[in-house]
Image (cartoon, coloured by chain):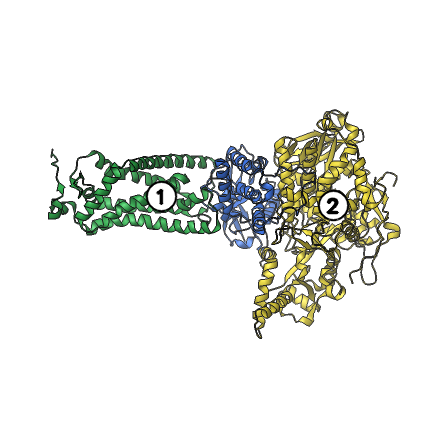
Amino acid sequence: MALTGLFLCTFLVGHLAGNLQLLISDPTHAAESFNAYAQFMTTNPLVKILSYVTYFSILFHAIDGIMLVMANRAARPQRYAHERASTSSVWASRNMGILGTAMLAFIIIHMSDFWFEMHFEMKPTFKLDNGKEVKDLYLEVVEAFHSFPYMLLYVLCMIPIGFHLYHGFQSAFRTLGLIHENLTLLVKRVGVIFSIVVPMAFAIIPLYVYHFIPSAEEIQKSESYKAKSTLIEVEND
Amino acid sequence: MNLKLKIWRQEGQNDQGRMVDYQANNVSDDMSFLEMLDVLNEELIEKGDDPIAFDHDCREGICGMCSLFINGEAHGPVKGVTTCQLHMRSFKDGETIFIEPWRAKAFPVVKDLAVNRSAFDRIIQSGGYVSVNTSGNTLDANAIAIPKPNADKAFDAATCIGCGACVATCKNASATLFLSAKVSQLALLPQGQVERKERVTKMLHQMDEEGFGACTNTGACFVQCPKGISLENIARLNSEFRNALLS
Amino acid sequence: MSKLNAQSPAGPLEQKWSNHKGHIRLVSPANKMRIDVIVVGTGLAGASAAASLAEMGYNVKAFAFQDSPRRAHSIAAQGGINAAKNYMNDGDSVYRLFYDTIKGGDYRSREANVYRLAEVSTSIIDQCVAQGVPFARDYGGLLDNRSFGGVQVSRTFYAKGQTGQQLLLGAYSAISRQIAKGKVTMHSRHEMVDLVVVDGKARGIIARNMVTGEVERHGAHAVVLCTGGYGNVFFLSTNAMGSNVTAAWKAHKRGAFMSNPCYTQIHPTCIPVSGHHQSKLTLMSESLRNDGRIWVPKKKEDAEAIRAGKLKPTQLKEEDRDYYLERRYPAFGNLVPRDIASRAAKERCDAGFGVNKTGEAVYLDFASAMERYGKTQANLKGLKNPSKEEILALGKIVVEKQYGNLFDMYKQITADNPYETPMMIYPAVHYTMGGLWVDYNLMTTVPGCFAAGEANFSDHGANRLGASALMQGLADGYFVLPYTIGEYLADDIRTPKIDTNHPAFETAEKEVKDRISFFLNNKGTKTVDHYHRLLGKLMWDYCGMARSKEGLDYAIAEIRKLRDDFYQNVRVPGKADRYNPELDKAGRVADFLELGELMCIDALNRNESCGGHFREEFQTAEGEALRDDENYAYVAAWEFQGDPGKAVLHKEELNYDFVKMQQRSYK
């Protein structure tokens, strides 16, 4: 759990770095940057390997987690009639299974929305500066985030991620047996900051896009964007 | 003061248990929690009822025998003390008090509030010692100097009284804190070095065998430990295990 | 006298043990494998003996009434363990430890045994360190020592205030290792309820499985009793709730002589009784007397006002306080030995100067210490004209560092803050020097039945020095008994496995079962604790810190009445074949009711005052203990004859060949 967990933390950082490009205010620039990044991420063989490691980690982390929760529940077949767990541990640490399940659900929605659509559905393309014509993922994201319910879901889902990280980050270090006294304190602090900053940053993006970036349709209407964008006719049926 | 007690009653390991209501009247502030139960038991006996069984012995917080889960917490609401050191002045008149046994698959109920903690003994038997014969013909006690910080940390870990509050309070009923205390004590001392790798592996294996859960680092064990055994020991246990695995 | 042969080896003192050890008969490894030994009790003596015997090759069956060997009451010892290591280079030696122990015991112990104890003490420390016992160390990484109990050297090894715990866990780890190897079979939650003697030899025990209620027969070639002391005869003591005399008493009834049962150690610094509900007493470490000053009000009306809650101790002026130890013993002051400090407290309280609700408490005051430390600190910090509050605040920090955990414990129990108001203390029963009579080989008068640790009488005479109980338990268990038992077992190598179908086992088992069914079917009305409490009160009042012929005669008659009442009116609930703590308790209290009488008889017989035994008729003009070496320099060993009242006295004369008997003085 600890190893996969920490690996997934690094994945989050990478993911966030990519997403932060969505904060570029000029849609054409943002699209250029974001789509180039997406192009790189989907074609680079090294990244490809890394992405499979990530899928595996998520899968392993989830299955191992479910098994752990089940085994640990079995260790106490008879529950207490009255328990005041909150006096001795924080809520997140006791509910990693629930938090994890919420995250898994989110990941599935998230994947089907962006990753799946990007890989398998026909969409507008974008001509990068280097001349390559790629699927316009930027436009896709903007469109999605302009849907209020979706934006809200995305933002709210960052809450369980934050709590999961709040406990998981430092827990992983203890499980790995890193015990230097000063380090323990450092890990604790870094863990808290990490668990607040990363989900917040993720949450800011949809909020920003929703409020400050024009809708996908408007973007497509702009002159500068038109030059790069190609609309593939989607048949109406 | 007068109190309403809700106490777990269970005839034996294989019987069904249930919570039963009792009334404790004229409880004095100076009484210890166990003395309050003593008085209740005397009343029960005089009435011809079956007294409530609970484990206790030294009543000064060191033998580790007493083991009550009081109002949702191991050893009750006061931190850093065992049940026998808990006094009734920590409760309010008219309060309802839940009293339950330690609950864990590895700690089956013997009767009422008394549980069988021999799983702890078996964990120690699996490797929680230094294999030295008792001839007395060992090195002179001062032959190896031990840095004071290590000796102090080893002592702190060794103060574990084996009461099982860590297991009782852990949501996973894990014995990791108990185990880590012994592993740490011996890992920090030169005498424990020879069997270091074997010890941690065997003891962890035994813990799993006994049906304890795994550690998820909630830290509740440390908060409820009457001796304040540090979580650093769990980190050390994990590092010992990692080193044993990698070599 | 005829029946008692101490088997003390001849020769110079310092060669006795090595000569003896060199000539003890051996049992070959092949034969050891065929020999079973039962060890009852797994405290310091029991666990160490079981581990050592198993290591040597014997098959050991160990028994404990607790759920684990780690819970024996040895665990509660706070202060430390003595050993003549002379690491501090302050002139300590085996002889000096021997001498201090003899003198501390008020010249009522056996020289050869005590010398051996001092001799093997050094090995204990080596052994424990090798086992990973984390003793306190100095900054150089070497073992630290502290001084203790009025001796003039620092020879006490310690692990904070938890030395007993650390040593017991060391012995526990040794026995755990043998359990894992299968050489020790551990029977926890089992209580020995009888000794089985076959053809004059101890051949096994009857034990009750306290969980299932089953009455079991266990045979062995020898039985070792390490069952601790009997302080709980007083109901209130610093002993654990389960500590009992049953195993030793059953052995006594089967022929083992009981020695000096009246020698009881009463510890001066315990937290006073708070009410009728009190179940046990808590010791506050003796180390507190290093800095605390003990006092009561000088005027009776002040004491009365304090008891009534109208006056606070802090309001009393210095000249209205009676620092009675400093007044009576200017040389040693608050640091007089335990027996003297205890008696002095009782004397003041009996005279009406006690300071708590019950009138049975004295003050242990740290105000002077805080002021003294505070002034030093103020000087060190260069404070000019510090206020009294500033000084006290600085002093408090120093006191907190030294005794913080004890102060916290006191506060937890009493809800008083000892930094602001003086602590209240009162003496409490703590240790029993008496026990089963054993010879130099630690064998009782029943061949094949041995006794070690607090259960035997051998090493502490009439008073035990601080930090010596742990030393004796481990010395007996690790380094004495495993060797001396060979002398007996060497004759037993041809004895096959003990047949537990022998009529002696049958009879013993039947007696046990009858006793159990008697208790469960007795349609009484009173609880076991009711009787225990009454017995304890009698013992405390008449066979406690001060005894008199009149009081003892009265107590004996009362105890006999109480015993009859007990058998008629006790109510024991529950079933025989279930976990039934009340039933276990009933058996124990029944034995205490017999032992109590024998203690009084022994106290009555000893027409002198020595160590923990103080007869009011035998004191000097200043109220000090008056020994009678001419007539009482012997060990009183009592033989059971069907009733404690009919016990027959045997005497083992104590010959002091190497030490001269002197009167103790702490003036």
Q: Kindly indicate the quadrant of the structure image that contains residue C352.
A: bottom right
Kind of element beneath mark 2: helix
Residue C529: x and y, percent? 66, 45
Which chain's colour is blue?
A: B
Q: Residues within 10 Å of mark 1 (few under 14, many from 20)?
A: some
Question: What colour has chain C?
Answer: yellow
State the quadrant of the N terminus of chain C. Answer: top right
Task: Work out whether residue B70 can be spotted.
Answer: no
Q: Kindly indicate the quadrant of the structure image that contains residue A36.
A: top left
| Residue ranking furthest to the front | A130
Which is closer to the viewer, label 1 or label 2? 1
Amino acid type indicated by mark 2: Leu
Which chain's colour is green?
A: A
Q: Who is closer to the viewer here, C611 or B234? A: B234
Residue A195: x and y, percent? 36, 48
Amino acid type indicated by mark 1: Cys
Kind of element beneath mark 1: helix
Residue placed at 77% from the left, 55% from the top?
Answer: C546
Q: Who is closer to the viewer here, C169 or C94? A: C94
Looking at the image, residue A16 lies above or below residue B203? below
Tag 1 subunit: A
Residue C156: x and y, percent? 69, 52
Instruction: Give the left or right position of residue C503, taking residue C75 as reference.
Output: right
Cβ–Cβ under 8 Å for marks 1 and 2:
no
Checking the image for residue A9, the label placed there is 1
- Residue designated by label 2: C562
